[in-house]
Each structure stands twice: as C-alpha cells, then as structure tokens.
Image: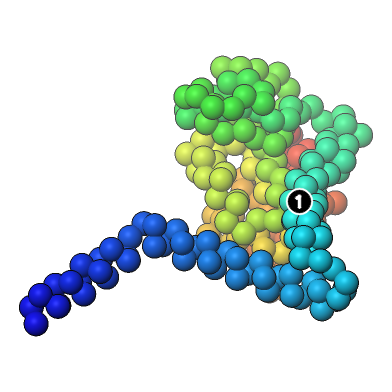
Amino acid sequence: MYYTETMTTATNETQFSNQYVLDKIEENKEAKLDLIIKELQELSPLLTKDLALKLYNKSISIHQSKIQGNGNFLENDIVAKFLDENEIPYKQQVTINKAGIIAGTNKRGGQKCYHILDFVIGENIEDGKSITEYKVISCKTTCRERWTQDDWTYSFAPELYILLTISKDYPPSVRFREDTNRKIITCCPKKKDDRVYKLNFEDLLTELKVSVEV
C-alpha cells in the first residue's frame, strides 16, 4: 500500500512541472484560436482555417498600430500644432535622469535616461537644468494606470504638470493629488467628474499663460 501511494505521488509530481504548465498554456492558446476561427467561419463559412488565422493576425497588427498612431496623432497633430500656432516655446521627448535633471532629448536606457517627457514648456530648455523650472504636458490617449508613469512629478514637481487625455479613464482627483500645479485636461469628462479644476482643451492656453505670468 505504501509503495502504491509513493508511486502515485511521484507521478503527480512529475506531471505538475514547468513543462506541464507550458503545455497547458499552449493547449489554452490553441483552444482560443480554434474558437476565434469558428466565430470567423460563422461570419464567412467559405473561410479556410489558414485564411481565418491570417485575417485574425492582421487585425491584431492593425489594432496595435492604430493605438500607436493615436498617441502620435494626439502629440503631433493636436498638441504640438497648438503650441506652434500660439508661439509657446517647448521641446518634445525630453529625457530626465533620476534626479529630475534634463539629460537630452529622445534618449533611452542607462542611468542618465530615467524618463522621457512628452512636452516640456518654457524658454531655454537645456541639459543640466532641473525639470522643476519648467511646465510639463503628459499626453495619454487612455490613462488607466499608465498615468502612474509620471510618479516622478511627486518628487520633482514641475512648475505646472498637466495630464492631458482624450479619454474618461483619468484618475480620481484625490489619488492624482490634484492642486493648483497638478491638473487634468480632457475632452471627455466623466459623468461623475470629481476634478477640482474641470478643464477642457480650450483651457490649455490659459493655463500655460497663467503659469508663465506667475
């Protein structure tokens, strides 16, 4: 009896291994693909499995590129254009280090490249200067938890920090720590909007000008 129990335990231990989990993951992946193919073939019964998979993979690729394109559209076609038209000095893709010091533009990786900022607003934006001397606009097509990428603003608070988004999923006012120097601008306010400063895109110019005057 003892021998049988020992053999059973050993067999279970062998089954529950890294390879066992990897195999289960692959099985689950295949099951999901089979379901996707079935649903696509319900829409078009003449679709072969191979063509259905190609259409599915292409749709995923298009969706991902669309998300990236939305971010570029918001930054370049809306915000940058707005700043240029109103002759507001700025730099895009500014890199800061872990001490909140500007370390160039569009640099990635290494100790000197802690975070890349969408827009830094102000005159004489130079390497070696503290980000606290300038205003910052962070563009997010969708926020969710992505806005927490800007947690550095709590340690090295810019003169003005604006989280600018085109979605309704921006953080609650208290969690965001909204105040006179930390504000959210959106074109899609929530029905239950708890922002202290209920700013729209048309308020951006006023916010930047007020900050300059102060």
| Residue at 70% over, 56% down | 142
Residue 38, by quadrant, is: bottom right
**Could you tell me which quadrant the N terminus lies in?**
bottom left
Percent coordinates x, y for residue 214 in the rendering: 69, 35
Q: Along the horizontal axis of the image, is 124 left or right of 51?
A: left
Give the x, y percent position of residue 64.
74, 51
**Which residue is located at x 59 percent, y 36 percent?**
158
Q: Is residue 63 visible?
A: no
Q: Residue at x 32, y 66 (%)?
A: 15
- Say which quarter of the image contains residue 75: top right
Q: In the image, what residue type sits under mark 1?
A: Ser
Q: Position of residue 132 (x, y in %)?
A: 57, 31
40 on left or right of 17: right
On the image, which quarter does residue 206 sit in? top right
Q: What is the x, y in percent for residue 160?
A: 65, 40
Instruction: Determine the residue located farthest toward the left in the rendered image.
Output: 2
